[in-house]
Image: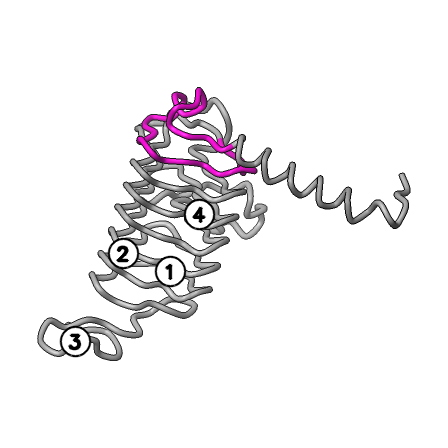
Amino acid sequence: MSVPPRLRPLLGRIIRRWRRQLNEWAIIGSDDREAATFAHFGFGAAILAPQGVMYNEKDISIGEGTMIGPQVTLTAGMGPGQEMLSTPVVTLGKKCIIGRGSHIIGHWNITLGDEIQTGPYVYITDQNHGYEDPDAAIGWQATTEKPVFIGSGSWLGTGVVILPGTHLGRNTVVAAGAVVSGTFPDHVVLGGVPARILRHYSADHGWQSGAPAS
């Protein structure tokens, strides 16, 4: 449908105004019916609109005051209706902020502590596909699950990937674009592919370059 050029600016303003209003009305808060489908949905928590893919909410716990940005995928299991072996599968602590377009996809256990913030498009998963059979398509091979833990107070930059089995200590900084696997102590800065410790904090000497002495 063509629009007369003189009307397009007016129609654009109306559409943008209504889009903002509709997204505000569509926020999922702790008082909404959808919140009751989660294992826990803390007071003051919110999932902003437009929402991304969400399923098996009964296996997902969201702490008080946590804000989940628009278009965030938040799932437990392989598909809707799956019965999980333990619950909750995904736990987000209190006062977290999950950036736009991020994916938190749990199959066994993903736990985020309190006051964690992420940039946009962060990917966190606790499952990998196997590749041992050279004759089988990777997507059809057996998967392996390893729990993921992100320590309280941490910051994950834009585009960070957290792989299965990762354990991050408290107040960890992960630089944008890093791919993280393994166990890391408190108070470090990680970066790179694969991620390594770029800086660490010493009570005696403050912030130091590289990894702490073993």
Residue marked by disc 1? 180
Q: Secondary structure at mark 1?
A: strand
Residue marked by disc 3? 206
Marks 4/2: CA–CA distance: 19 Å
The amino acid sitting under disc 1 is Val
Marks 4/3: CA–CA distance: 37 Å
**Start and end of the magenta stretch?**
27-54
Circles 2 and 1: CB atoms closer than 8 Å: yes
Asked if residue 45 is among those painted magenta in the image, a careful observer would answer: yes
Marks 2/1: CA–CA distance: 9 Å
Marks 3/2: CA–CA distance: 20 Å
Specify the label residue 128 is tagged with.
4
Tell me residue 105's x, y (percent).
44, 41
Marks 3/1: CA–CA distance: 24 Å
Tell me residue 93's x, y (percent).
28, 41
Q: Residue at x 34, y 29 (%)?
A: 41
